[in-house]
Image (cartoon, rainbow, N blue to C red):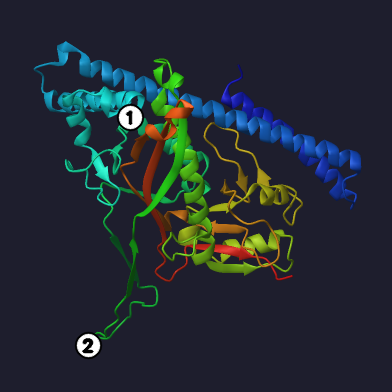
Amino acid sequence: MATTLELRQQRANIWEQAKKLQELAEGELRDLTAEEQKTWDQMMADIDALGARVERQERAERIEREMNGYQSQTGADRDPGNEGTGDDEAGGQAERDRVYRETFGRYLRGGREALTYEQRQVLQGNFQALKGGEGRALTTLTGSSGGYTVPDGAMAPFTRAMIDWGGVRRARTEKITTSDGRDIPYPTGNDTGNTGRRISENKQVAEASPTFGGKVLRAYIYTSDEVLVPFALLEDTEFDIESFLMTAFGERIGRIQNSEDTTGTGDSMPEGLTVVTTVGKTADAAADVDFDELIDLELSVYGVYRQAAEWMFNTTTLGILRKKVDNNNRPLWSPGIAGGTPDRIWNYPYVINEDMPDVEASAKPIAFGDMSYFKLRDVRGIQVLRLVERYADYGQVGFLAFHRHDAKYIDAGTHPIKVLQQAGA
């Protein structure tokens, strides 16, 4: 099997061939012929396919490292030779985590009826009412009115699935995780309008106060809706029910959260990146983007924010930008070759977010800037409910997940992220 470095090199070689094809047409001041366009499209498809292979392979390697680390840690926790050492406290916590995870897995397969009294008590400690979220034991409530918090070890598939379906999460946005859902005030300060002064001796200084503001990160409730699992799969001990459910929940919740993190109004929902950011450049055309407009958008963002900046757009927009050249006929797109090196548009990495609009009249298809000023807030616990009687006549069990989340753009007035807006029709 080819290594990720070899796959990246193959992508780079195909891109060099594609550039030569493009440069030939540009040098002759013509468009690509039908045959050349067919070749170009195939080269782009090959580049995308190789890119997908690289991403899958690197993801598999990350998961393998995570699993090896988890197994090694679990093995160490169970090793009797560790007893009586200075690691007793950490080992005790690891043992509690292991017991909770095993109990949670048993609950998923057989429900509360399959648990002993002691196991029910273990789960009850991480019971959450839908709007409670403090993780305290609520002995007057049953599993039908709340959910059991997913163990940390099972969170990895959920998080990865949300990232796979969420371009906003894949970007360098700041991710804030809290243990409960209380509002979080996030203050801002802007002192860019004030400049120090040179004064003469014995001269009184003037007052120059910064401008303060702020936003509040809330915890809006999202649900996966129901995921139905046949009895046969639940009874199969080889079936990894936790990973299956976390992936399904992550994909569903990841889609809706990414959509609202991109285009949300901020009214009882997250603020959408394309809604609350400032327009840095308006394109001359309704359905096209040129190199000069990208440069204007880049330079509309202060230099201090460009140091960690990246682009964000969807796949259709990437297809347009791949065919663009700079003023010296050099392609704007360049592939990443070394391991972990991202593909770039005009010296900056980019993130694909399929919820960004297409390049069309009045749309805002491209964002640029320091994405760390866009804050994603997650409440740590995912709550899972198990529905038995409702689907018993189908031989299935229903599972339902809730997750709390918000997104806010923290802009003190210096606009660290800006967008390109297309001309009207």
Q: Is residue 164 in sight in this rendering?
A: yes
Residue sitting farthest toward the bottom: 203
Q: Quadrant of the C terminus?
A: bottom right
226 vs 300, nearest the viewer: 226
Q: Which residue is mark 2?
A: 204
Residue 4 lies in quadrant? top right
Residue 248 horizontal/vertical position (percent): 47, 35
Question: What amino acid type should be assigned to the residue bearing mark 2?
Answer: Gln
Residue 54 lies in quadrant? top right
**Which secondary structure lies at badge 1?**
helix
Q: Residue at x 32, y 81 (%)?
A: 198
Q: Is residue 17 in sight in this rendering?
A: no
Does residue 186 appear left or right of residue 136 in this picture? right
- Which circle marks residue 320 in the picture? none
Q: Is residue 256 above or below residue 385?
A: below
Residue 195 horizontal/vertical position (percent): 36, 77
Residue 357 horizontal/vertical position (percent): 63, 57
Residue sitting farthest toward the left: 84
Q: Residue at x 46, y 44 (%)?
A: 253
Does residue 333 appear left or right of residue 81 in this picture? right
**Which secondary structure lies at badge 2?**
loop
- Judged by depth in the image, the label closer to the viewer, 1 or 2, is 1
Q: Residue at x 86, y 44 (%)?
A: 24
Of label 1 and label 2, which has the lower sequence position?
A: 1
For the residue carrying disc 2, how many other residues have a C-alpha within 10 Å: few (<14), some (14-19), or many (20+)? few
Q: Quadrant of the N terminus?
A: top right
Does residue 19 appear left or right of residue 226 in this picture? right
